[in-house]
């Protein structure tokens, strides 16, 4: 690939500071992805600039007009504090006919909306836990189709936002209380789905039309306290001290039968295409002891840091980080041929 000018687009909090070595470990996590990506871009011989997005598109328009980048490396995960608004940014890039990495706006809309994604995949006969939506300002009345325990999630949020041990509820009173918590703290609908006891399995997918399915990765929670439910809470995902204390780790999924591996690959392809995803994504499942797979959610544009699930799974099959970033750039250019 010839030398490119890559505009690295991040949420404003993810900007790389002038002196990255001077920040704390917690603050470093805010811009770690951008630091990893730009380091790889330099290794590949590309020029890059970064731009932080907050609440307007004019800076993006001006930077594109002034610097004339070859492609935008999209790492934006929110706009005006709303994760669901990220699709508007790539929609704008499409209107400008500016190539960008990662998922297209249609795929972002479908994947970000937990309820819509489940409805689409149910049509495509993908097994998902039974669920119910609880809109704001309405009485909480649980469907007779649902069986407790349930896990209550935020409708339009990602990265385990709002998920804690209290999210597992065992009766209608606890359900109403947790739904109220979601309404009051996130100002959006709540989604309750039947809690599936099992293992947390992640499958990375890379591609637009031709898809590469990466080896399944697992979130290991076996060292949590005995009374804790094995779910990916906010603390499990993001609290470094909590992770270290309880031995929480990610790694290649163990003891998977050939049948389960085949199902993971086949179903992940179906989900990726049904949700109109492109670039790269991560599909999350629960795997029960008897081998049943339940779709939980699809993560378009998941964390692409060098030590996260997607990059680690790619490395396990010989695709080092520079090659992964090179492939992501190539896929962005190929997608741009559509507009």
Image: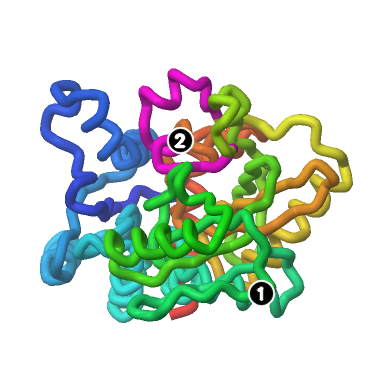
| Magenta residue span | 230-249
Numbered circle sitting on residue 144:
1
Point out the image quarter for the C terminus. Answer: bottom left
Say how the picture is coloured: rainbow
Q: Residues within 10 Å of mark 2 (few under 14, many from 20)?
A: many
Nearest to the observer: residue 100 or residue 78: 78
Residue 69 appears in the figure: yes
- The reply to whether the C-beta atoms of the residues labelled 1 and 2 are less than 8 Å apart is no
List the residue tagged with mark 2.
Answer: 236
Picture residue at 42% right of the left edge, 58% below the top: 178
User: Which residue is at a point 66% across and 72% down the rendered structure image?
Assistant: 121
* Residue 202 image-quadrant placement: top right
Upstream in sequence: badge 1 or badge 2: 1
Q: Is residue 206 visible?
A: no
Of residue 210 and residue 234, the one placed in the foreground of this image is 234
Q: Is residue 338 left or right of residue 183?
A: right
Residue at image point 19% right, 64% down: 80
Task: Look at the picture and state if 92 lies above or below 229.
Answer: below
**Residue 211 position in % (x across, y down):** 66, 58
| Snapshot quadrant of residue 131 | bottom right
How far separated are the C-alphas under marks 1 and 2? 32 Å
Would residue 252 be found to the left or right of residue 22 on screen?
right
User: Which percent across, then down, holds residue 46?
Assistant: 32, 44
Q: Nearer the viewer, residue 266 or 139?
A: 139
Q: Secondary structure at mark 2?
A: helix
Residue visible at 19% across and 47% down in the picture: 13
| x then y, percent, for residue 254 | 74, 30
Residue 333 x, y percent position in the rendering? 45, 63
Dot 1 crowding, Cα within 10 Å, few <14, some 14–19, many 20+: few
């Amino acid at each position: 690939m010839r030398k490119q000018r890559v505009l690295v687009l991040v949420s404003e909090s993810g900007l790389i500071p002038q002196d990255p070595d001077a920040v704390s470990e917690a603050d470093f996590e805010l811009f770690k992805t951008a630091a990893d990506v730009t380091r790889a871009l330099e290794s590949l011989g590309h020029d890059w600039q970064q731009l932080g997005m907050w609440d307007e598109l004019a800076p993006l328009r001006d930077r594109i007009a002034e610097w004339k980048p070859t492609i935008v490396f999209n790492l934006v995960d929110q706009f005006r504090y709303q994760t669901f608004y990220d699709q508007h940014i790539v929609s704008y890039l499409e209107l400008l006919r500016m190539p960008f990495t990662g998922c297209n706006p249609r795929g972002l809309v479908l994947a970000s909306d937990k309820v819509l994604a489940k409805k689409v995949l149910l049509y495509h006969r993908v097994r998902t836990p039974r669920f119910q939506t609880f809109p704001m300002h309405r009485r909480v009345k649980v469907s007779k189709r649902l069986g407790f325990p349930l896990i209550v999630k935020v409708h339009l949020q990602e990265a385990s936002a709002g998920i804690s041990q209290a999210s597992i509820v065992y009766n209608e009173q606890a359900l109403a209380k947790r739904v109220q918590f979601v309404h009051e703290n996130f100002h959006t609908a709540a989604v309750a789905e039947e809690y599936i006891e099992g293992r947390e399995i992640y499958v990375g997918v890379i591609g637009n039309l031709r898809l590469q399915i990466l080896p399944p990765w697992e979130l290991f929670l076996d060292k949590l306290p005995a009374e804790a439910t094995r779910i990916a809470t906010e603390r499990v995902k993001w609290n470094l001290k909590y992770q270290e204390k309880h031995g929480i780790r990610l790694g290649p999924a163990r003891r998977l039968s050939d049948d389960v591996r085949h199902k993971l690959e086949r179903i992940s392809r179906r989900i990726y295409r049904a949700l109109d995803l492109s670039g790269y994504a991560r599909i999350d499942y629960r795997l029960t002891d008897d081998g049943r797979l339940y779709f939980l959610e699809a993560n378009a544009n998941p964390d692409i840091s060098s030590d996260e699930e997607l990059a680690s799974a790619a490395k396990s099959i010989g695709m080092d980080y520079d090659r992964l970033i090179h492939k992501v750039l190539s896929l962005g250019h190929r997608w741009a041929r559509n507009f």
